[in-house]
Each structure stands twice: as C-alpha cells, then as structure tokens.
Image (cartoon, rainbow, N blue to C red):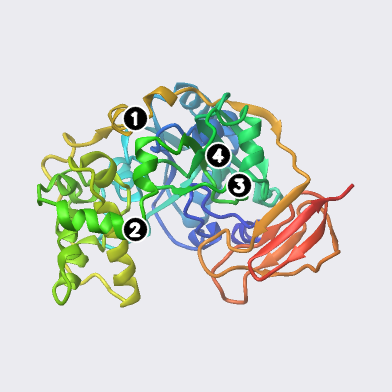
Amino acid sequence: MSLVTQVRNAGVVGAGGGGFPAHIKLVAKADTVIANGAECEPLLHKDAAVLQHRAAEVVRGILLCADAVGAADVVIAIKAKKKHAVAAVEAACAGTRVRVHLLDDYYPAGDEYDLVHSVTGRLIPPAGLPIHVGVVVQNVETLANIAAAAAGRPVIRKTLTIAGAVREPATFEVPLGISLRECIAAAGGATVADPVLNLGGMMMGETTTDLDRPVTKTTAGVIVLPRDHHVMERKLKPAQLQAAIGKSACDQCRYCTEFCPRFLLGYAVEPHQVMRSLGFTATGSERFSEWAGLCCSCGLCTLYACPEQLYPKEACDDSKAVLRAKGWKWTGATSVEVHPMHDGRRVPVKSLMKRLGIADYDHPAPLREGVLTTSRAVLPLKQHAGPPALAKVTVGQTVAAGQVLAEPAPDALGAILHAPFAATVAAVTDSTIILTLLS
C-alpha cells in the first residue's frame, strides 16, 4: 500500500490548525520538505512537546514525506529557544539526511511564506503555495501522524496546550471529541470566574466562551483569560462596532502596514488602505479591499502595530470574504522583492506578549504523561479543509477504537474520521457524531 493511501486511510490532516488533508501534499513533486515547528503563537507549547517527546516519529514522518515527493533537502525548523526540543530533534536526526534549522523568536515565524523564505531564501509567488517554489511544508505533529499512519495507526488523538489563567498550565494528549471543559479541568481549572477561551492562540485563534466545544484534529491549544482582560474586551466587540470605530478614528498612520510581515516580504498587503474602504458607501471599496487579498491574518496590525487600537486585521478579513465571494484572483506582479527593513521590523515574541498583556502567564506547559480520558466524545464531521465528511455509522451501533466513523464524499476534499475509543454511537446528525464510552 502506498504512503498516500496509508495517510488518507488514517485521516491525517494539518495538525497546526489548517486541517488540509496531508495525503494531498504527498502526491506533489518537490526538492525540499520543511517540518514546521516554529509555533509562533505566544504561550503555546504543543509543537515543542511533540518534538521533544516524539522526535523519532517526526524524523520518520519527514523522511517518508521526502521520499514520497522526491525531496533531497529535508529540514526541521524550530525556534532556538526550545532547547530541550532542539536537543531531542538533533539526536533523532543523527545519522540521517535531515537537518535542523534554528529560528529566532519572532512572530509570525510559522507563517508558510515567512518560513519558506527563512529556510530556503525563496519567495512564494503572490497568492501561491509553497509547492510553487518546490517546497512541501508539514506541521511537526502532522509528520508524527504520518509516521503512525505508515504503521497502520489512524488519527484518534490530539496534542494541545492549556495555558493562560489556569492553575497548572500543561500540554496533553487527548482523545478527539473530548470537551475543552475537561481539558481545562485537567490543567487544574480556570483561575477566573468568567473565562474566555482563545482556541489556537491569541493572535490568529478563535475567541469563544463555550467551554463545551470539542477538541478536533486542528485544535492546537487553548489560552484561558478573564473576560475583563483588555484584549478579550477588544475581541468580543461586535464586528459592526469594530468597523464603526475604524471608520471614525483611523488617521492613516501606516503603522499597520509598516509592521505587516507579508508587506515586509514584498507582497501587496497594505492594511491602512483596506481601512479606507470602511468609509466608502458607494464606489471604491472594491479597489481598496484588494490590498487585503494576500493578508495572512496574523493579527499584528490589530494587536501590536495600531497606536489607536483599531481593527485593521478584521477589516482585512471582511475584505477577503468579499473578494472570495466575487471569485477574485491575483492579477498583479508575480515577482516579489523583500523590503529593506524586513529584518529590523520583526516582532519579538517577548515584546508581543508585553503588548498583549499576557507576560505574567508565560509559564512552562510540560507534556503530561498518559492520555486524558472521557466518557463522551462529540466529533464534528468537518475537521478538515473541504466539505464535511459523511457518516458511515448509525445510532446504537457499537464501534471499536480506530473504526471508521465518516468518510469524504467521492472525489471531495476531506479526511476520514475514526472512533477515538470503543463506544456506542449515541447520535448522528449532518454535522456531528456523538459517542459514549462502551462500558
């Protein structure tokens, strides 16, 4: 059986948050494979934990990936400050053709455009993908899952960090479908009465107050903060109010653009121009919205650069939604030239944490031994890029750990979903399968 088939059958997707089915990348041809272990979101430690404790699996996975795509250059990119993880990876790479590339501690080092440039010196064409410059990028946990898939083990667990306002910040291995409430309880519980959760990180993650949300294949971590934290107050403002504030207060200072990592790599991203579109009521908004087309939604403009604490990232997100609805395609220049101030304007993570007001939460979150358990798993049918998978089980059916629960429609982009433990199917809807532990 080919590696592509093994990875597809195991339901492996991008574990860093993107959720792109991993087997799709394995049919490409590339000269370089990069393991993305940058983990640039403040307070998250799951990639470092994977590299420290599953280094041999990551190395095995990246070598399998490199052989599949024909790559000669095989690189694991990790921040130099993650000393224990670096030591483990370097030991696992000894005697192999895999090399370690150390990154500085800046944000967003894990953005694929930035990472590919840092490791190879190549610039991905505007609106392009790493494969367009001969590179395949996989998250380090994805690569560990690829190694497991080659050994016949499907994805039924997730590694994630619970950090912020909790008593015992930690990184856990958990079954898919476990609730965030249970994960937070395992970290000693929240230290605030009315917690708000940042799923996937403070900068690019989703903000929610729903502690009963389930862990999925793309859950990288949870940062718990009090509702009255300044950043949480900003994030919880309604979108219409965010836009109204920007419309009335933006003075076109350009700081959002001057600190934009895509702009500094030479791409046509100018959030200050996108902010102008908030003031248009008739014509012109389409033109200025195009300055958001290549935005990576890193959030630096909103949460770091803007001196008036406006919402350029959110304006860019709205503009990109409009552009997608219109079928917008990049028609500008295909060559890119790095801004001369690129290196000097990189944002250190320590500076970012101070600006966010979370430096006091910067504690280790070591990997706990064992796997958390639960008696109930809520499994969304969409845990990947593409349409939801289609359920293959019925209510009342008994399933074994690792059994297929759902599959993508024929020829549809997606990933197979497996049972995280032996269970009874309690419910099946168009969007979710619920399992209860088999007693």
- Circle 2: residue type: Ala
Q: Which residue is mark 4?
A: 58
- Pick the residue in front: 406 or 86: 406
Sequence order check: which comes first, mark 1 or mark 2?
2
- Check whether the beta carbons of the residues at disc 1 and disc 2 lie within 8 A of each other: no
Q: Position of residue 61 (x, y in %)?
A: 56, 45
Name the element at disc 4.
Answer: helix
The kind of residue tagged 1 is Gly
Structural distance between the alpha carbons of marks 2 and 4: 40 Å
Q: Residue at x 61, y 35 (%)?
A: 184
**Which element carries disc 3, helix, strand or loop?**
helix
Q: Is residue 329 above or below residue 167?
A: below
Disc 2 crowd, CA 10 A, few/some/many (<14, 14-19, 20+): some
Q: Amino acid at mark 3?
A: Asn
Mark 2 vs 3: CB contact within 8 A: no
Circles 4 and 3, Cβ within 8 Å, touching? The answer is no
C-alpha separation, residue under disc 2 versus residue under disc 3: 37 Å
User: N-terminal of the two: label 2 or label 3?
Assistant: 3
The residue at the point 23 percent across, 43 percent down is 309
Going by the numbered disc 4, the residue's amino acid type is: Val
Q: Position of residue 156 (x, y in %)?
A: 69, 49
Q: Earlier in the sequence, mark 2 or mark 4?
A: 4
User: Pointer 2: what residue?
Assistant: 239
On-image quarter of the N terminus: bottom right
Classify mark 3: residues with Cα within 10 Å, few (<14), some (14-19) or many (20+).
many
Residue at which label 3 appears: 145
Q: Percent from the top left, x then y, of residue 159?
A: 59, 40
Distance Cα–Cα, label 1 vs label 3: 35 Å
- Residue depicted at 14% across the width and 59% down the height: 273
Circle nearer the viewer, 4 or 1 = 1
